[in-house]
Image (cartoon, rainbow, N blue to C red):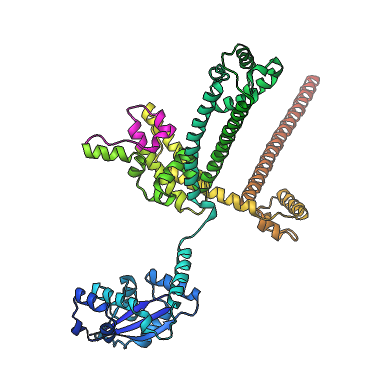
């Protein structure tokens, strides 16, 4: 059976025919030995056809299809043109060797060409790759390397879908820098305290905050010059008048030694550097919060920006964190304790970085492990939503946070929490409503003249009681009706229904009033008839008396 080989390069498709394989023997070791020798390999493998790519874009599309296991129309035409035709109902007298089994199965499904992909085929393709430049005569030295480099760059760029707003690498760098700044600011602040305490030791006991101490060290400078004239400025810095008076009194009776002007200048410069670092640390913290709200809004709203950023940095990326199961996320950051427990057959840790969340601290000692497991479950869901959803929203994170709060109440008070399916349905509805609100806000504004015309048409429809007045467009008002949101239409319908209901109630009240009036009239008429009958009876009685 003849063996053909399909080899995909950066410059085009090539088809080779391998003949005389019985001389080499289908032994992998024998093939490896024969591959390195071009004279021996060239007698067995020969180039049958070569189809160059038209452009770099065409090469990228073809290689993308090959990597996904899809046969393109160009490849199909190339194979059908250069390979023997397979007759229906008969076995093919040849086979096609391919590097990837996926594309081999697709070729067989479409064209019924038998394909194989094994170690023997891979070894022969390795020899083809090694001596490919010798098979094609028109190739210049260096052309193949340039084509490989260009296609490699474009292929990698297409595979990595780069989104500037969702770069989790910035969060990883920011949280690392924040931890480093915390250590540096603390060590530098302690150095300022120790240095300035030689001059004014009592200040360290009065002011505990490092940033405020550096501010005061720069402001006071020489303690001998500190007087009650600067009391108002000291009060502004400290925010407390009693403390400001205490600092002034301590400066008068200080036990510290005097420093030269040069030493005081160096202390001031170092205190200024500490202040700048602490201010930069605040700005970096705000930057981290904004980035976390862009990259992982649900995770940030569930567990907090700092803990979420630490989880992402420890996992390596948001995608890696989304791939982690909740059991791994629970002990993320406690790997040493885990492996030590496995080695000594002790108790495994219950939590890692997730311990810094406020939920774990609020839970009782008995329920901390349960709470960590439940919180890790919700964090895993939030990270997957953030990683794979296209629209960023905090609805799911807020709902997951509510679930964690309910679970805390369940552990403490025994209040039964809601079911997860009900909470997620509510979250999906809220997310869809937010999307519709955003779409209505982005809709173009309607001119005021058209609005007034539509209002007039609506008022006429309300007076006439016509329900279909909304659907009938006003003059030149079609664009305004298209631009109007569904919510406004619903509100207008409700208003019309209310007005109609009011009219109906007024009508019923009027009908009742008319009925009451008719009954009163009837009563009056009856009374009048009774009076007339009484007068007639009295006249008859008088006549009878006269006759007697």
Residue 266, quarter of the rendered image: top right
Q: Is residue 540 above or below residue 327?
A: above
Q: Residue furthest right?
A: 546
The range drawn in magenta is 345-372
115 or 175, nearer to the observer: 175
Residue 311 percent across, percent down from the top left: 42, 43
Instruction: Give the position of the N terminus as an image quadrant.
Output: bottom left
Q: Is residue 473 above or below residue 152?
A: above
For the point 60% across and 49% down, which residue is it? 437
Figure quadrant of residue 14: bottom left
Measuring from the top left, give residue 40's x and y in whole percent: 25, 84
Q: Horizontally, is 112 left or right of 441 in the view?
A: left
Q: Is residue 396 visible?
A: no
Reply above or below: 71 against 370. Answer: below
With 102 as the anchor, is 119 left or right in this view?
Answer: left
Residue 522 in the image: state x and y as whole percent. Answer: 72, 34
Residue 119 figure quarter: bottom left
Q: Is residue 3 above or below residue 374?
A: below
Q: Magenta stretch containing residue 274, yes or no?
A: no
Residue 371 magenta-highlighted = yes
Inspect this view and state whether residue 236 appears: yes
Q: Point out residue 218 in the picture as x, y percentages from the top left corner.
A: 62, 27
């Amino acid at each position: 059976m003849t063996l053909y080989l399909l080899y995909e390069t950066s410059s085009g498709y090539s088809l080779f025919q391998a003949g005389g394989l019985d001389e080499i023997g289908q032994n992998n070791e024998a093939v490896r030995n024969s591959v390195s020798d071009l004279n021996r390999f060239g007698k067995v493998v020969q180039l049958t056809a070569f189809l160059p790519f038209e452009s770099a874009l065409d090469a990228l599309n073809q290689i993308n299809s090959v990597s996904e296991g899809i046969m393109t129309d160009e490849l199909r035409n190339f194979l059908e043109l250069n390979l023997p035709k397979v007759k229906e109902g008969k076995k093919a007298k040849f086979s096609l060797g391919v590097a990837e089994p996926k594309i081999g199965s697709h070729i067989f499904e479409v064209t019924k060409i038998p394909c194989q992909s094994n170690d023997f085929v891979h070894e022969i393709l390795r020899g083809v790759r090694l001596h490919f430049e010798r098979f094609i005569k028109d190739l210049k030295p260096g052309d193949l390397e340039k084509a490989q480099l260009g296609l490699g760059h474009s292929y990698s760029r297409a595979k990595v879908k780069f989104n500037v707003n969702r770069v989790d690498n910035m969060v990883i760098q920011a949280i690392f820098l924040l931890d480093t700044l915390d250590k540096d600011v603390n060590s530098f602040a302690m150095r300022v305290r120790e240095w300035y305490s030689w001059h004014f030791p009592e200040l360290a006991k009065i002011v505990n905050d490092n940033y405020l101490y550096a501010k005061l060290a720069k402001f006071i400078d020489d303690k001998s010059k500190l007087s009650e004239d600067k009391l108002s400025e000291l009060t502004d810095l400290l925010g407390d008048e009693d403390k400001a008076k205490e600092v002034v009194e301590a400066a008068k009776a200080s036990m510290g030694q005097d420093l030269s002007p040069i030493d005081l200048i160096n202390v001031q410069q170092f205190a200024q550097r500490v202040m700048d670092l602490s201010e930069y640390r605040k700005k970096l913290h705000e930057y981290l919060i904004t980035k976390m709200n862009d990259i992982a809004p649900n995770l940030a709203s569930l567990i907090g920006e700092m803990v979420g950023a630490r989880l992402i940095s420890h996992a390596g990326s948001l995608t890696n964190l989304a791939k982690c199961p909740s059991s791994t996320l629970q002990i993320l950051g406690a790997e040493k304790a885990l492996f030590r427990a496995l080695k000594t057959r002790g108790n495994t840790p219950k939590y890692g970085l997730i311990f810094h969340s406020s939920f774990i601290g609020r839970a009782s000692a008995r329920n901390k492990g349960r709470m960590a497991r439940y919180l890790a479950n919700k964090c895993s869901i939030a990270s997957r939503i953030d990683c794979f959803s296209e629209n960023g929203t905090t609805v799911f994170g807020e709902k997951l946070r509510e679930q964690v709060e309910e679970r805390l109440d369940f552990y403490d008070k025994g209040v039964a929490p809601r079911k997860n399916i009900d909470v997620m349905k509510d979250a999906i509805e809220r997310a869809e409503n937010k999307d519709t609100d955003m779409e209505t806000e982005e809709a173009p504004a309607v001119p005021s003249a058209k609005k007034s015309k539509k209002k007039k048409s609506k008022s006429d429809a309300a007076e006439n009681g016509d329900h279909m007045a909304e659907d009938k467009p006003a003059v030149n008002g079609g664009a305004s009706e298209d631009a109007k949101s569904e919510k406004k239409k619903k509100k207008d319908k409700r208003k019309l229904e209310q007005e109609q209901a009011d009219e109906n109630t007024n009508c019923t009240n009027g009908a009742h009033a008319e009925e009451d009036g008719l009954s009163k009239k009837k009563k009056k008429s009856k009374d009048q008839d009774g009076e007339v009958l009484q007068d007639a009876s009295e006249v008859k009685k008088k006549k009878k008396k006269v006759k007697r």
